[in-house]
Each structure stands twice: as C-alpha cells, then as structure tokens.
Amino acid sequence: AAAGGPAPRVAFHGVGAVAASARLAANSLDIVVIARAGSNADHDLGGADRASVLADLRAWFPKLRVEGILLGCGFSSSSPGTMEAVLDFVGSLAGPRVEVFLDDDSCFWFVKQAEWQARDPQRSWFSADRYSARR
C-alpha cells in the first residue's frame, strides 16, 4: 500500500496448504475451505489421498474460531481417501457428536464447537497420541 493508504485486503501465499496455515494465528478464521486446483496441488478434488486430507484438516482446524466453518470437497465414493480422512478426523474430536453436512456435489462442511477447543494453546489440537488412542 502507498504511504498512508489502506492496507491490502488480500494476501497470496505461494506455498502448500499446510505451510500456509502456519502463517496464520489459531482461532482467527471464520471459514476454511479445503480444496485443490492446479498442478502444484498436494491432492486434487477427485483423487485426494487420506494422508494429505488429514494433513490439511490437522493444519487448518486449529485456525478456525469457535463456530467457524470447515468446508471441503471430494466426499464421495469416488474419492475414498477424502471420506476416510474426514470421518477419522471428526470421529476423533472430543465433545458432542459432530454434525457433518453433505450436499449433492460431494462437498462437506461442519461447524467448530466450543467443546473442541484445545486445552493447551501451544499444543496442536489434533495430536498423534490423541488420534491413536481413539482408533
């Protein structure tokens, strides 16, 4: 921005999704969209693998504020990795039952509840020990 002018309202991050998430504060976003486009994607909408979807969910979920929405695409039988990752992720959350909403073109979304907040803000909300204990 020019000296004294308004601050830019858009920031482009030319890095992968997980690396980009590290640049944002926890509990700072109202909505996160997990989607892919282009040849540099970690996974694409139709053939996402479970590991990359889980990595995105783990990286971006802590960035959502309470009552923020996490939205993604590829929740269909033609993309079993996405389905498995989403179900595993929401199934591991403590607190009340997770309501995952689906639409007719394979998009999913859910709302972050207060009960899902991390107790220790320095620790990742979705830790490997917590996940493996629930499996």
Image: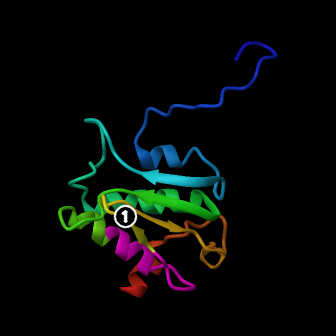
Regarding mark 1 in the picture, which secondary structure is present there?
Answer: loop
Q: Residue 66 in the image: x percent, y percent?
A: 65, 66
Task: Return the residue found at the far front.
Answer: 104
Q: Residue 97 in the image: x percent, y percent?
A: 51, 85
Q: Is residue 21 above or below residue 124?
A: above
At a point 36% along the width and 75% down the height, the residue shown is: 87
At a point 30% along the width and 47% down the height, the residue shown is: 42
Magenta residues span 85-99
Q: Quadrant of residue 77?
A: bottom left
Specify how the rendered protein is coloured: rainbow
> In which quadrant of the rendered image does the C terminus lie?
bottom left
Q: Is residue 7 above or below residue 105?
A: above
> In which quadrant of the rendered image does the N terminus lie?
top right
Q: Quadrant of residue 14?
A: top left
Q: Is residue 12 above or below residue 85?
A: above
At a point 24% along the width and 59% down the height, the residue shown is: 49
- The residue under label 1 is 103
Q: Residue 123 in the image: x percent, y percent?
A: 59, 67
Q: Residue 131 in the image: x percent, y percent?
A: 42, 78
Task: Return the residue found at the far top.
Answer: 2
Residue 69 located left or right of residue 115: left
Q: Quadrant of residue 50?
A: bottom left
Q: Is residue 13 above or below residue 70?
A: above
Amino acid type indicated by mark 1: Asp
119 part of magenta stretch:
no
Give the mark count. 1
Circle 1 packing at 10 Å, graded few (<14), some (14-19), many (20+), is few
Task: Return the residue found at the far right.
Answer: 4
At a point 44% along the width and 50% down the height, the residue shown is: 18
